[in-house]
Image (spheres, grey):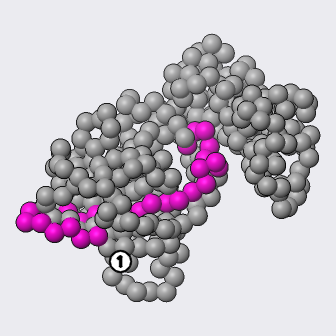
Amino acid sequence: MDGDLLSELLGPLRLRGVFHSRWSARAPWGVAGERESCALLHYVQAGACTVELPGREPVRLRAGDLAVFPHGAAHRLADAPGRATVPLESVLPARPPGRARTVRIDGPGAETVMLCGGLHYDAAAASPLYRALPPVLLLDRESPAGQPLLRGTLDGLAGEWDRAEPGQALVALRGFELALVLALRAALVDGPAAAQPVLAALRHPAVGAALLAVQSRFGEPWTVETLAAEAGMSRSAFAATFRRLVGEAPMRHLTARRMQEAARLLEETSLPHDAIARRVGYGSVVGFHLAFRQWYGTTPGGHRRGHGPGLRATT
């Protein structure tokens, strides 16, 4: 996978803040969290715990393991599979970005120590490719250990906990941001691509080249033929491979990226519609209006009115 593709994947997220916590839980214990509008990281420092997602087999995390939830998927954490749980809200009733909390759960059994972070980002800015990431990525201890910067960042964040130093909120934000980037890089390099087709798509030299083109050069007049040429494949082989790995046709993926950027420009700038149409690859305002209405169910003008006028012009 081209390293630039990972940068393009994460660059638009616009991280706004992180809520982080350190857990010390003694068995028996179990906590169930609903879906959250942020990326979540759970790093086990000591002991072990079980992660359960609806419809999936429980996964055991041990010291040094890391679980990443790119979309904040609902899940359960417990000392053992099938353990009775309490709602996360009862343990952490409020989790505003920029805050940190310590959670202690008493019990007679073995202790689990975890560092958890919730990175809040602008969901509308997440690229179609980021949204295609699986609900959870699991990295065993060998993966963070094989990525010295990731392991050092996680251990450094854990070590910061007991130090009342200036700038802790900013350090936490940047530290967890770095940990998210490094964890996704490790998952893309070492993760089980067979079980996660989108990881295989990102690693695929031909499909990865096309994805990078869609993500960063969406304004060009792409067709399936020209994207296939960018990938160095025949049209039929490219279309079939792209659909199999990404989960949708190349042109639909391109439209999703264009519509995402069009919505951003309508919300954040005062650019006229014809200028936005050109920026996102449409040769006519009429074609842009039709595509936007079909995608969002409203006109570009209606979207702009509904989200407030842009405060600045972009050149």
Identify which residue is drawn at 32% across, 69% down.
Answer: 22
Magenta residue span: 103-130
In the rendered image, the residue lying farthest to the top is 236
Which class describes the residues within 10 Å of circle 1: few (<14), some (14-19), or many (20+)?
A: some
Identify which residue is drawn at 81% across, 48% down.
Answer: 304
Using the image as rendered, state which of residue 258 and residue 238 is in the foreground. 258
In the image, is 213 to the left or to the right of 166? right
Identify which residue is drawn at 73% across, 19% down.
Answer: 225
Using the image as rendered, state which of residue 176 and residue 235 is in the foreground. 176
Identify which residue is drawn at 54% across, 66% down.
Answer: 17
Using the image as rendered, state which of residue 75 and residue 2 is in the foreground. 75
Secondary element at image label 1: loop
- Relative to 145, residue 239 above or below: above
In the image, is 229 to the left or to the right of 181? right
Looking at numbered disc 1 in the image, what kind of residue is underneath it? Answer: Trp
Judge whether residue 117 is colored magenta. Answer: yes
Q: Is residue 150 visible?
A: yes
Judge whether residue 224 is colored magenta. Answer: no
Report the quarter where the C terminus lies: bottom right
In the image, is 286 to the left or to the right of 209? right
- Residue position marked by numbered label 1 in the rendering: 161
